[in-house]
Amino acid sequence: QIQLVESGGGLVPAGSSLRLSCEASGRLYSSHFLAWFRQAPGKEREFVAGVRRSGNTYYDDSVKGRFTISLVSNTVSLQMNNLKPEDTAIYYCAVDRQGYSRQTKDYDFWGQGTQVTVSS
């Protein structure tokens, strides 16, 4: 069993930066894939970025070049720069025990989410 706790959300103006963190309690294995998803009002939850235990990273095209995901020990962070109003959403940390996936249905553990609001 893995528990995930996110922190770092907030309300910021467009062009600002935020750093989200997610601490995982429980054992992480080499096959585990950690990711950030987000869900805006009225929209489906979508993949934002993910990282393998080996360090390989993956990004959605909408955040490539602006967001950076990193994994240190059991904490996965998401550095978000040059934020835009369309980045407004609840951000969730998640773990897929089987490896890399961009599909929400493949994820086994989820955090409670943290709100990010970007004003124009």
Image (cartoon, helix red, strand yellow):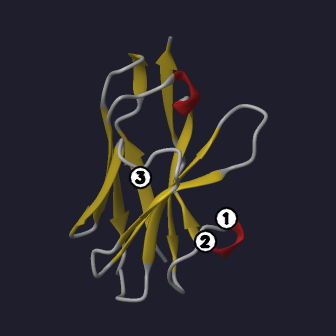
Q: Choose top left, top right, bottom left or bottom right for residue 52.
A: bottom left
Q: Residue at x 48, y 30 (%)?
A: 116
Q: Residue at x 44, y 64 (%)?
A: 50
Q: Residue at x 32, y 34 (%)?
A: 81
From this view, report whether residue 14 is shown above or below residue 81: above
From this view, report whether residue 110 is shown above or below residue 120: below
Contact (Cβ within 8 Å) of mark 1 with mark 3? no
Residue highlighted by disc 2: 107
Spot the residue most to the right.
42
Residue highlighted by disc 1: 104
From this view, report whether residue 99 is shown above or below residue 65: below
10 Å neighbourhood of mark 1: few (<14), some, or many (≥20)?
some
Q: 44 left or right of 102?
A: right
Contact (Cβ within 8 Å) of mark 2 with mark 1? yes
Residue highlighted by disc 3: 5
- Give whichever of 79, 8 is nearer the camera: 79
Residue 113 in the image: state x and y as whole percent: 53, 44
Disc 3 marks which amino acid?
Answer: Val
Judged from the image, the secondary structure of the residue bearing numbered disc 2 is: loop
